[in-house]
Amino acid sequence: MTEMAETSRNRDSRSRRTGVVVEVRSGRPSPIALAAAIRLARGLEAEMRSHFLEDQELISLASLPCAREVSFSGRRTGAVSLERLRRELALASASVEREIARLARLASIPFQFGILREERWQAIESACRSGDVLVFAEPMTGEDAERAAACVLAHDSGGVLGCVCIGPQARREQGPVLVVLDAVATADRLIERASLVARAAGGGVTLAVAAETAEERRAIAEAARAALAGKVSGTVEVASVDASRGTAGPVLDLARRASAGLVVVAVGGRLGAHGTELRPLLAALDCPLFLVS
């Protein structure tokens, strides 16, 4: 069962359907991930809800008689104190609440904070069912990002917008939005999401048209220009990406050259699906990655 201790920053905003949910698992969330969450909440005109996850699996393991605590140096070991673990989690959640509340207040974004006591992926499933954008506040492994993308795809009919992940190299969240377009069918949806963010940040959009043939790239570019008409006030650039030898490498190069602040890809596309190039992309990307349903 989920127990949630909630502090509302603007209870009147609960009627809004779309929200940006920030999943926090430690007392040191990434400033890059938090800035991306603020940017999205502002662009979507949504409230922001932060969930500090007290992973019940971790607490259950700590409760075992055989559980041992090992120092980072490996020189000291001892029995795990469940009371101390809970106290440290409480201190961490209070610190996170203060920091995110401060950022939300500066951006004039409605904010709620809660503590979730359940297994991590159950919490992620709940967020995906709610029609929100989910932002992971700590760097993710490629395996976890693939699992999150699969969760988003599974709940697409429920209205989930997508999830934002960062990798270990994330250093930047300011800059143009880079939208990777690899199919005509997904162009409208991707551009709709990206244009909201770009409009709020006052930045431009770079379209990376990725396909294996020039004819495919031309068709995608035409659909993208039509979808973008009147939606972005900043500059719009179109770059052609030959995907015949892979997509992750050229997209990484383009993101660096453009100093992108956010890369947007379609879940289920060349870069956003299980078993494709999502893992190497996230591992080397120096800005947040938005996986859009």
Image (tube, helix red, strand yellow):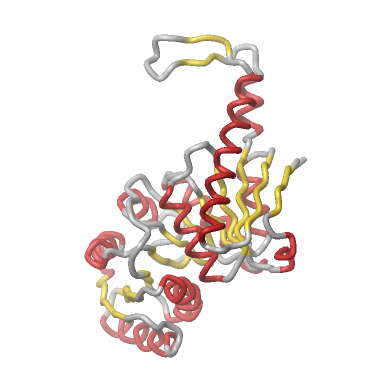
- Horizontal and vertical percent for residue 177? 37, 69
For this rendering, which residue is in front, 175 or 189?
175
Relative placement, left or right, of 4 versus 68 is right
- Horizontal and vertical percent for residue 109? 58, 63
- Horizontal and vertical percent for residue 264? 42, 66
Relative placement, left or right, of 163 versus 277 is right
Which of the 4 image quadrants contains residue 88?
top right
For this rendering, which residue is in front, 192 or 245?
192
* Residue drawn at x 70%, y 48% as measured from the top left: 7
- The answer to whether 71 is drawn above or below residue 267 in the figure is above
- Horizontal and vertical percent for residue 91? 59, 31
**Location of the N terminus (image quadrant):** top right
* Residue drawn at x 29%, y 74% as measured from the top left: 212
- The answer to whether 9 is drawn above or below residue 242 in the figure is above
* Residue drawn at x 26%, y 77% as measured from the top left: 240
- Count the marks: 0
* Residue drawn at x 60%, y 38% as measured from the top left: 94
Relative placement, left or right, of 138 versus 245 is right
